[in-house]
Every structure is written in C-alpha cells, then in structure tokens.
Image (cartoon, rainbow, N blue to C red):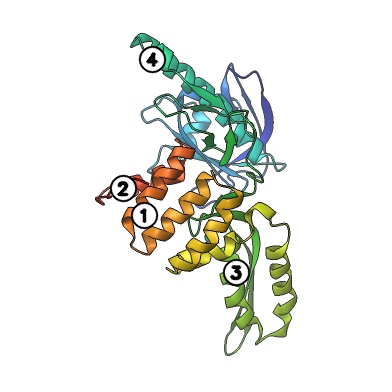
Amino acid sequence: MPSSYLSFRFRYINEKGKPTSFFYHQARIDDGIGIRLGEDSIAIADLHEVVRYGNQIAMILKPYLTLHKHISENILPNTSSIVIEVGDDLAADAKSAIDQHRTAFSSLMRKKQLVAEGRGYQFRVAQCPDCEAVIDLTDRKETPYVYCKYCEVLFDKHRELMPKSEDYKVCPECNYYNRVQHYPEFHFYALPKQRKMAYKEHYCCDTCAQRYHEQTAWKNSVYLLGIPFNVRLKNKMARGVNQLYQGLTEANRLAQDGKIVEADALYGLLLLRNETHPAILFNMAQGFYKAEMLDKAYRHFEKSLEMCSNYQPTLDFLELHKGIKWKVIVG
Ligand SMILES: [Zn+2]
Ligand SMILES: [Zn+2]
C-alpha cells in the first residue's frame, strides 16, 4: 500500500454546481482513514468511481452505505455521489492520490481473491510511472506497452513513458489520439441591437482546434477585434508539436473526413517513426472503420492490442461496437 498522503482544502458543490459554503474545509487522503472530509470520512473501499473535471472531483459511492452526517447531507439528489471543489490548484493531485490508494486497495483484494482460487501465480500488476496508480494486468497478455487509464499515458516494460505521452491523449471530442490541450474558443455573435462576445476555453486536440480555427476565422473577419485571438489560437496549434508525431493532425483529419487513402499514406509515414505505437494503430483502425473497411479496421484494432493489451480506447471501441460481425483476417 502507498504511504503517501495529501492534505487540501475543499468545499461541497450542490446540484446546481455551486459551492455550498463560503469557507473551505480541510481534507486529507491517507492509508488509515481513506478520505477525510472535514470531520467525516469515506473509506477507500466505499468508492465506486472518481472523476475529475477541472477543479472539481465527483466521488460516486457504492450504494446503500451508511454515511457520516455531512457527507450524506451533500449527496446529490437521485445519485449516490458527492462533488467537491478542491482549492489551491490541487484537484489533479487529489485525484491521483485517491487513484493511488484505490488501485492499491483493489489490486490487494484481487490478489487475495486469486490466491483463494488457487490462481495467485496469475496475479500481475504494473505501477504507472506518471500517476503511480496500480494497474491490474491479470488475464491480459504481456505486450510491449501498458496503458494507464487513470492519467491516460502509455509506458513500456522499463516504466519509460512513450515520448510526449503526458500531452498526447485520445481527444474527448473526436476520439482520435493526438496532442490535447486547452484552446481558447472565440465567438462573436452579431445581434440587431447588441454585440455579444463569448470567450471560453476548449479542451481538445490539434485537429479539432484546426476546425474551430477555420470556423472562428470566418466569423471574426466580420469583427476585426477577434483577430488577435485567432492568431493566438493558430500559434498555439503550431507550437511544440513533437517531431515523432509530425503529420498526425492532418492524418486524423483526413481519416475523420473519410479520406482513408490519403490518411493511410500519412499514417504509414508516422508508423515508420513509431512502428509499435498502439494509439496510432487505434487512429488508423477508426479511419478504416469510418471508410467502412471493416476487415482492415478490425486488423488494426487487433494490432493496437498486440502492442498494448490493456489499451482502453481500443477495448472501449470494440465493446461499443460489439454488435458488428468483425471479419478477422490474418496479415
Ligand atoms: Zn497514470
Ligand atoms: Zn479532437
């Protein structure tokens, strides 16, 4: 079990997404108590799922628990979840401390269970070099890479991260692997009597940002004010693309638009530099799927699992489309 602990400040969030108090309370995560929230606590074993969005963390609790007073008061209506806002920019650290404890606990339970079934020798785990979550690999084939679904990185047998793995993920908008970052989204709305401006951040990949850029460039040309923001967006897109992934943004865009012949040629070049990359194989598979070339799609999904047997985006895609009769081909 990890011996790390973390203290932070938090406020409960209500169903309208607003804090329920002006002041923050103290929270602490450690081995002995689990998660202490003010005077109350939640045992690690009682967490069903934990999700972070920005500085908020949602904890979905196992049903029918007897909860401490303040925690039960803050359960959101019709759910078994609480949401907290974490102060001082510590939400990502808090989430990963919870993940460390949760995964260490559940792998211990898994080991006990396997030992009880006389299969203790099959127990296999890896610890993520980035967030230190313990990843259960029992019943998974041994492959060159391991995926951490908690912080979405890929790493090898020596616990070396794949190049730029912290910045490259499956985009929450288009589901393709690429560099994902916060982009400013900029819109002007021309209304008859008033001019309204909206400015917000967008978390997406370079391909999606390129599409936004084209849309907003057109809109902003009407109101020159918007141009500096668009230049900023364009600069952000161009900056710091890893050499290994040169061409990935274009390849993904072609694949998403169903232009698989052109996309395939670009992916081919990318694979020369990253021949065993499970996520590039995953993108290719999605491209073939989009172009309705199901046999090739399946072969590439399979290849991505041969490189990383627990690659969750591929497993999720296959699970979601399990109704399809994939034709398995060799080669
Ligand atoms: Zn991780
Ligand atoms: Zn995207």
Compared to residue 106, the image places residue 49 above or below, namely below
Indicate the quadrant where residue 26 lies: top right
Residue 298 percent location from the top left of the image: 35, 50
CA separation in Å, label 1 and label 4: 37 Å
Say whether residue 41 is visible: no
Q: Are marks 2 and 4 in contact (CB under 8 Å)?
A: no
Sequence-first disc among 3 and 1: 3
Residue 204 percent location from the top left of the image: 58, 58
CB of mark 4 near ligand 1 (< 8 Å): no
Residue type beneath disc 2: Ile
CA separation in Å, label 3 and label 4: 49 Å
State the SS at label 3. helix
Q: Relative to the observer, which residue lies in front, 131 or 278?
A: 278
Q: Are marks 1 and 4 in contact (CB under 8 Å)?
A: no
Sequence-first disc among 1 and 2: 1
Q: Do the residues labelled 1 and 2 touch (CB within 8 Å)?
A: yes
CA separation in Å, label 2 and label 4: 35 Å
Indicate which label's residue lies in the foreground, 3 or 1.
1
Sequence-first disc among 3 and 4: 4
Q: Residue at x 29, y 46 (%)?
A: 328
Q: State the residue position of label 2.
A: 329
